[in-house]
Amino acid sequence: MLLSLILLPFIGSLLPLLAAHKGRTVCSWLTAAPPACALLLLLSTAPAVFQGELLTIRWDWIPALGLNIGFRLDGLAFLFALLILAIGLLVILYGHYYLSAKDSHGRFFSLLLLFMGAMMGVVTADNLLLMVVFWELTSLSSFLLIGFWGHRRDARRGARMALTVTGGGGLALLAGVMVIGHIVGSFELSDVLAAGDILREHHLYPVALVLVLLGVFTKSAQFPFHFWLPHAMSAPTPVSAYLHSATMVKAGVFLLARLYPALSGTELWFIMLSLVGLSTMTLGAVVALFKHDLKGLLAYSTISHLGLIVLLFGLDTQLAVVAALFHTVNHATFKASLFMSAGIVDHETGSRDIRLLSGLRHYMPITAALGLIAAAAMAGVPLMNGFLSTEMFLGEAIEQRVLGGWSWLIPAVAVFAKVFSVAYALRFIHSVFFGPKPGPLPKQPHEPPFFMRAPIVILVVLCLAVGMLPALIVGPLLSVAAASTTQTILPQYTLEIWHGFNLPLALSVLAMVLGVFLYSQRHRLFNLWNRLPPLSAPDVFEFILHSILVQGSRRITKLLESGHPQNYLLILFLFTIALAGAALLQLPSLHGGVSMTAIDFPSLAIAMTMIVAALGTAILHRNRLTALLFLSVVGLGVALVFARFSAPDLVLTQLSVEVVSIILLMLILFLLPRQNQRDSSVQRLWRDAVVAGVGGLSLGILTFAILTRPLDSISKFFLAESVSGGGGTNVVNVVLVDFRGFDTFGEITVLAIAAIGIFGLLDGMRLFNPRHLGHHYAKDRHPMLLSVLNMPLLPLALMVSLYIFMRGHNLPGGGFIAGLITAIALILQYLTNGLNWTNERLNDNFHPLVASGVMIAGLTAMGSWFFGMPLLTTAHTHVHLPVLGEIPLATAMVFDLGVYLTVVGATLVILENLGKLKPFTSQPTTEP
Amino acid sequence: MELLYATVVAILAGSGLYLILRARSFPVVMGLLMFSYAVNLFLVAMGRLHTGKPAIIAEGAQYTDPLPQALVLTAIVIGFAMISFITVLALRARSELGNDHVDARSDEDQQP
């Protein structure tokens, strides 16, 4: 049941989208259904929750990370869930009338329900990490809602700002939660709440607290992160009423309450919360008076009230917590109704500017009356709910002694803020609804439809009911919520409208009188305010974003990303050399103790040839053909080295790959300039030579260090299991097709992808005409001698490759090598007889070959599944055939066949397509 | 022998690196090929240097380490795929831009 409570809004968020084309009414009804069901579900849990039961459900998600899916419903979660669902329903009703026909109802309601689900997740999550996930989801969905009118610049800016601030705070919160998890050893809320003492005594406590509070302050728009909230007012009014008064900004408050037992009770907690709360409360109240935009006024008022709630948590007494929760509920009710009233004014008159509006009570008396009551509640007038919680607040503010000799400062500032709050509440009512009839307005004002006003009526009735019968209406809810917040038994307190004549009451009355006086002097104040330099938060914000972040990162990017790959490579090389060099410096001695073997003359000769050829390639690289020939000498040398050191499979592979590579490079060279001009300065050449030298030297030293150290390899397993497990005596081949067959499968896939990529690159390419490059070619393009010799060579080569393939499992050979030999034999046909001649005799489409190769290998690998074995399990047997003798058969050979086909296909796709390229003759070349 | 082997690896790697740092595509391709030779030799050396002990199971034989060989065999083929792709990329760049400089700017852009 708990799960469906949370899932209902999420599932519900699909409904409006599906129903969007059925018309607005159907869409709104369908939107309202899931939250209504969820609300009923929630109320059905009320008896249990009010008994003090803790309802939980839990599944493991990623236990290794301490991340579980778990939800809990206690008094605190119940209180917030009630706010979210109930006000959400009212907002849906209101939104149905508020949105114009042009707006997409489906999208709006879908986002609203998504947000609702995210909020439900935040308040019911039983795992801190899970809570952070939902927390970020509220930031994201509120971004989409604020930017709902994406065609408006202010909406886009406001949304961006809100996301940056709250999303950034969310990251801080994540970090804070990680620290808490590190200290406690668990992310489960029950563990964390029980570990308050461990947390507070840990040396990382300040870090955790500051990070968590960053999340709280950004989300709840506390100074100095408050600036995003007024600009989030560019959202449609239902969004403002819901997100930015009743729910999302309360997520921060919720988190304070949730983690209260774990984090509160320290000097740091008190100082941070009370200072931030106090300054936010004052700043919000003062600025609100000077806002000419109705919603702007309400936004700053919200900031001020959130500051008050945060301050209450900072006062850190149990009664202050009760007062904070009480005020949270009260603020949600009166502020949501005020936003809706402001929205009605905007909707029916076309303006939200207080300076233009006046005397609207003549046109919309009922709305005026409702607004009046809600504003009175906001100002803390007796008989309203706002009065009770502000009285409690003033009482707590007077009682506290935390600032020592400066303790009087808190009630004094509280009264100062309250004076302004009375004044702006007056302004909201008096300037808009009273006074003379307004001048020309964009629309002729009139009362809104009854049901658009209905949510306000409900909320205002609640304000009054709570204000008059507090103990009856919210008493039990508040006590169960407060008890689950503090996790202790609460002291006695009474919710009554009349506490007798006492200091809080006197202060309240004083604030009222001063507030009225302040409002009467408002025009002078506005004059003073106008003399202040104008400061636009979005401009400042965007300026900081652009000048520091964007420009700064652009500069860093430019520094690193110069557009010259040579520089990138140089940086990479230097970095790698530094890393390897640092590791090499740690070695106690270069020589690892294993004695060296003697040098024989053939080896020395091979080595010298390779060294000369390698240096020759590097030095003569501008003369490309010569350099290429030198390079091929090195490649052949490598094959000889493999032969010298017991690697017969590598010899065969290296030889055949070498042939194909050099043919490929020759083909390319035919189409590229034959020579380099000198590009680099002498200094650069020397610099590169030094870097390359040091790099080569490092690799050489590393090689030497490894070669002189004893070997401890995992290969004993392969050697021991090769025959019994893989059915072959050539261990290298068995490793390839059996033990590490998955690597090989990945590898032939890479080969196939490369072939297809090359095919794509060559498609439609325009070439420079190589004939214009001033080189002489042999006149005899296909020498007779070669083609005659080649005729019998093809079947022979194919025979050889079959032989190499068949014996591969037991003797050097296998699919790779056989494939390359076949490919070379076919390429030789192309070379000697020309493309056209060969293609007449050979199907020139090699793509199916590549595909079938990869598929055969893949299917063979998966075949083992049919026998209930893991991927790539092989079976093998020996078959005795006449003439051929005993033939070992293993399913690995089918896999090898796939390898063979892929190699043949890919090689031929690459080379044949290169050979096919027709020089583009009609275009005059630009190269000299 | 070990010292000689290491020297060859060093020279091959150094020449390869030097070529990779050049400004035109063809030398870079040659450098990559050269460097992959060096790396393959280096990898084979992980199994140490043995003469006449191929990893082919036989009665009473001694074996070199087959694992680095299998890995290098894979590396050679993958290296071939990479080299072919890069060469063709270089060719395409030349055809699009009119020059074979690695900065990949067309001839007009390169005029100072």
Image (cartoon, coloured by chain):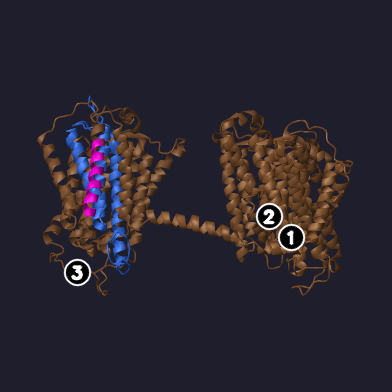
Residue A112: numbered disc = 2
One can see residue A62 in this view: no
Specify the farthest residue to the left: A601
| Image quarter of residue A442 | bottom right
Give the x, y percent position of residue B20. Answer: 26, 51
What chain letter is assigned to the residue under label 2?
Answer: A
Residue A354 marker = none
Precedes in sequence: disc 3 or disc 2 = 2
Q: What range of the chain is rendered magenta?
A: A683-701
Label 2 element class: helix
Magenta stretch: helix, strand or loop mostly: helix
Residue A553, picture quadrant: bottom left
Residue A770 falls left or right of residue A444? left
Q: Amino acid at mark 2?
A: Leu
Q: Position of residue A798 (x, y in %)?
A: 23, 49
- Asked if the residue under mark 2 is in contact with the one under mark 1, i.e. CB atoms within 8 Å, the reply is yes
Residue under numbered circle 1? A95
Could you tell me the amino acid type at mark 1?
A: Gly
Q: Tell which of A293 and A909 is nearer to you.
A: A293
Viewer-nearest residue: A85 or A787: A85
Q: Quadrant of residue A133?
A: top right
In the rendered structure, the colour chosen for chain A is brown
